[in-house]
Image: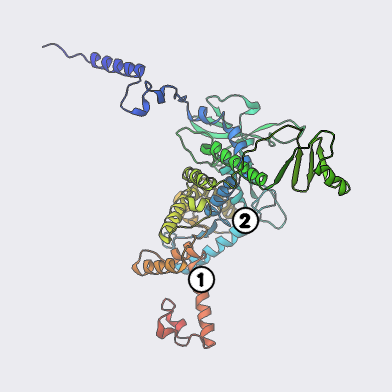
Amino acid sequence: MAKRSKVGPFRTAIGNLVASAALGIGGYAGGRRDDRRGRNWRPFAGSAAADINPDNPDLRARSRDLTRNTPLASGALQTMVTGVVGTGLKFKSTLNAERLGLDEDKASALEDDIEAEFALWSEQADFTGQLHFLDLQSLAFRSELENGDVGIARRFRSAPGNPYGSCLVLIEADRIGNPRGVIDTESVKGGVVYRNGQVSGFHVADRHPGDFMAKSVNWNFVPARGKSGMWQMLLPFVPLRVGQPRGVPYFAPILHMIKQLGDFTDAEVSAAVNAAMFLGFEKPASEDSMSPLESLVDAQGGAGAATGADEVELEDLAFIRLPPGSDLQLKTPGRPNAQFDPFFIAIAKQIGVSLDLPFELLMKHFSASYSASRAAMELAWKGFTVRRAHLVRGALDPVLEMFFTEMVALGRFEAKGFFDDPITRREWMAHQWVAPTRIQIDPVKEAKADEMDVDNGFKTIEQVITERTEGDFERKHRQRAREHVKRREAGLEADAVARGANASLPQEVLQG
């Protein structure tokens, strides 16, 4: 029996692949190259760095131009910042008393201490001394959306009256790049330096390349981590491809569409204004005779401004004198354009899909039913949650680790085992970033739904407080107890116990 060749089938398979590639024949219609639609559609299959880095400077500049000059883009950006960051993600310590060997009261007191220290640091978090940490969050996230990424560097500054020295410096994406504009290499891509496959640091310009200054740009290497292992610079961005060194602006996929829609809007507004102007053409009987218009101007003592040899403007009126015998045909303007709004809405819906913003939220226009509006808000909230999680993991959690380490090292807070065991270290830093409250389309219906979820055990009271009103259950519970006592003393809640309105309050409080 003859031996079966192992090389033959392999060569056959390779030959089939080569033949299929040459003929443009495969299993997917989208991969065909022998039809009219796909014949000239041959995009370059580059790496993430090759596809992104060369275009990034133009993408950033165009993205910023849109947010400055196009209402739809600036509104979409602000909606995303408001939904994800709002007034700022607030730090809340959530110590696990059992795992740290503490009783509940002690753990609660320590949480208050940690939050008080973080609030003190937050006031001086900005190296320039201009912004609060909550404001830095909003600015950093906005910059990441506009430019694709943002640098966050750790600096040390000693200031009188401030026990903490660690501060944050935000670095706009344009300042991070290859020195002197050299092309990417295996170890440096878009200003990101790699060593043994890992990000080891970044090349950062000492000033923005677009500054109008005679001073030349100098480049400095900033390590990603210091000798102690603590981070020195972060570059948060949303990765879209494997091996992607830099982020791309939020509007990158639809820059041209938003730009053209903005130009179309400007053109329609200008056309409507022009159509609203009164325009008259005068044909004199002869070149030597004084026209009625000239007689009118002469009678008014020369009122009106002559803008040309044959044109006189009287406020918003324009009269143009034509040579004798000439004729002019005008197209009657159809303004306002009845098709403008449907067309604008159709394109805006596509833009909203790309930006992960439902049309209702993109346009700030809720005209559908409660169910449809609620569904749109739920979709938007999920998108905000994804972006918020990225911001927390890429920026806020590392910043918290920096603060916590300095706080313990300074002796301002005693955290037993913090520097000895990574698990213990993580337990001491257990926390939650309290996000902006969800938008309530119908507060009564949503309050009723929350009440049912709490009764059925699907939600906790603290979860409802976090989602709807912000704040902290423990603090609100104590405040409600104090308010209840005051109201009972004033005779305003004499039958509260009978009604069961405050069944969640401690019995000793209810009994006065």
Give me the C-alpha separation between circle 2 and circle 1. 23 Å
Q: Residue furthest right?
A: 301
Q: Locate residue 463: give its quadrant.
A: bottom left
* Residue type indicated by callout 2: Ser
Depth check: 228 or 467 in front? 467
For the residue labelled by badge 1, is the local secondary structure a helix, a strand or a loop? Answer: helix
Which tag, 2 or 1, sits closer to the chain's start? 2
Kind of residue indicated by mark 1: Lys
Is 13 or 95 nearer to us in this picture? 13
Tell me the mark number nearer the camera, choosing from 2 and 1.
1
Q: Is 74 left or right of 212, judged from the image as shown?
A: left
In the shown orientation, is residue 43 left or right of residue 234? left
Q: Which mark is residue 315?
A: none
Give the answer, above or below, for where 12 lies relative to 382: above
| Coloring scheme used | rainbow
The residue that disc 2 covers is 122
Task: Assess whether mark 1 and mark 2 are in contact (beta carbons under 8 angstroms).
Answer: no
Quadrant of the rendering where the N terminus is positioned: top left
| Position above or below: 103 against 367 | below
| Total numbered labels | 2
Image spot of residue 321 (x, y percent) = 77, 37
Give how far across and how far down residue 352 sits, in percent: 49, 46
Give the farthest residue toward the front: 285
Residue to which mark 1 is pinned: 476
The front one of 494 and 187 is 494
Res 27 seen here: yes
Residue 278 on image: x %, y %: 70, 46
* Residue 159: x %, y % from top left: 71, 53
Q: Quadrant of residue 505?
A: bottom left
